[in-house]
Image (cartoon, grey):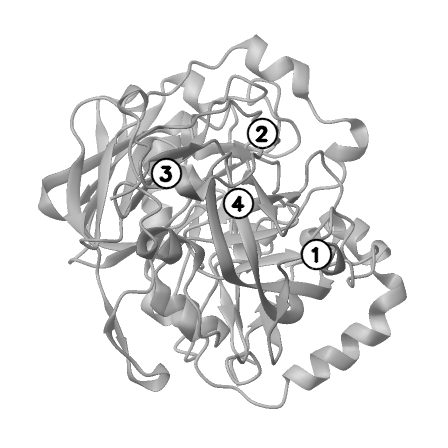
Amino acid sequence: MFRICSISFPFIAWLLLLFLVIASIDNVSANNNNDNKRNNDKTITFTLLRNHPFILGSPKAAILKKRQSVESVPLQNLYGREYNVEIGIGTPPQRFNVTIDTGSSLFWIASKECPSFQCPVNRFDEKASATYKPQFGRVELVYALGYADGKPCTDTVTIGSNLTVSDQVMATVSATSNILTNAFDNPSSGVLGLAFPALHRATSGLSGDSFISNLIKKNLIAQPIFSVYMNSQYQYGSHGDAKIIFGGTDQTKYTGELKYTAVQPYTIAAAGINNDYLYWSVKGASISAIDLSSGGATYTHEMANDNIVFDTGSTISGAPADVVRGMVEILTGTKPANYSTQDQVYFVDCNVPDNGGGQVIFRLADNIELTVTLRELIIPLETLDPRDASICIFGFVPLESTNSGTSLDYITYLFGQSVMRSFYTVHDMGTHRMGFAPAVLSAMSNDSLGHIKPTPSEENHWRPMNPSGAPNNNQATSSGNTFLINASPNYQIAVLTLITILVISIC
């Protein structure tokens, strides 16, 4: 049985997540019964590395294979922590915001069968869809900070005004814990996984193809690729212009030329994975942190071709403890660095970028260099504007192998939004490679920050950052067009849940 359990939560995490505990007080007994059910077995676990309206049009299948177009609609970047896209499910289409997640591959949505206190979001009404088809079995997704249980099905899924997949395999979730919240505007109602099909099959046990696989197999997109542009974490409102492009790229969102390197396959005997592609993972060469305010003091770590997983669903990034410590000490000029063993994060001065700043250069295979400024690695917690913040954390946390039999044992480095925002990334499923180029980042301004500060209630109700986990495999049975879809971040972070997504252990 595939399952996963979280490590114990430090004290601050409980304070930050108190509102979720209160909201779920009525279903404690039910949750305990479900938790007891999950504690029977333990085997290999595959970590799901998680991490705005636009108009949906009616399907135009007869035109799809003839038209060569790019469809772009501006979206609003509300909080800079989660990137959501609007989709339509069913016939007629019901519209939802879902999280785009390159760290998982299953598509799931909250169902009307899920009680509102567990799923306080827009929920899918199966009975209102003429194309909904139930499938046999159950789907269980167990995360480090909760779970989502439901059933498999197929239905029509639409993204944009023309991009439609019929009979898409998905899951409708009828019970959750600590996954969904309505604490913020336009909350996510589910997850759209964009990792490789093998991860979809291994983690869900479902026999059908993932959404991105269907786009490719049905020749609905011009090339078997999608590309992602996030923009700076400090761009909010309509200024963010974050987007995901299915089937092509947007040359106005990056500088220079795209450089490509091969995605690495995995072999995990205990899970029956033999040289297959799971995550968007490439070989790394080195990491160099440079303090530009002290004459170029540098910390360098050679990576020995370790794999790096790129995950749009993770707000923060992870690396071995000594590497993160080395980066923080050089970039902040503080030794020892201010690491909280209780919170398991590095607290840093919010004004560090204004005091001279620095940068980190990540070198990948094939001579690819990715440079991230210190400003993008300083994450404010109690306000959206780093110039007003008094509590900030570093954009990397320690990520260690637990030798527990989970898929985290195969992930030494994980680059989430704190790194990916600085680059335009191309995900090529046809030739199994990733492309990188420096992103065109919009400058931080009062106009982009000031008018969307969270309300006092929002500031005190941090939404947990994309909890990671893995599903129970034994119980989970059962040359076209280029389309551009904009994605928009939805604020989702808590101090300690940044760690619980990355550091988890088998019970």
Residue 463 location (% of width, % of height): 68, 45
* Dot 3 or dot 1, earlier in sequence: 1
Residue receiving disc 3: 420
**Label 4 – label 2 distance at C-alpha:** 12 Å
Of labels 2 and 1, earlier in sequence is 1
Find residue 442 and report its image quarter: top left
Determine the residue located farthest toward the front in the rendered image.
Answer: 62
Point out which mark residue 470 bears.
Answer: none
Question: Percent position (x, y) of residue 95?
Answer: 65, 42
Nearest to the eye among marks 1 and 4: give it. 4
Mark 2 touches mark 1? (CB < 8 Å): no
Which residue type carries mark 3? Met
59 with respect to 490 (left or right): left
Q: Amino acid at mark 4?
A: Thr
User: Amino acid type of disc 2?
Assistant: Phe
- The residue lying at 65 percent from left, 66 percent from top is 148
Mark 4 surroundings within 10 Å by alpha-carbon count, few (fewer than 14), some (14 through 19), many (20 or more)? many
Q: Which mark is residue 158?
A: 4
Camera-nearest label, 3 or 1: 3
* Mark 3 and mark 1: Cα distance apart in space: 30 Å
Mark nearest the camera among 2 and 1 is 2
Real-space Cα distance between discs 4 and 3? 26 Å
Q: Nearer the viewer, mark 4 or mark 2?
A: 4
Q: Secondary structure at mark 3?
A: helix
Q: Would you say the residues marked 1 and 4 are in contact, meaning their CB atoms lie under 8 Å apart?
A: no
Residue behind mark 1: 11
Residue that badge 2 annotates: 54
Q: CA distance from mark 2 to mark 1?
A: 40 Å
Q: Earlier in the sequence, mark 4 or mark 3?
A: 4
Q: Residue at x 15, y 58 (%)?
A: 304
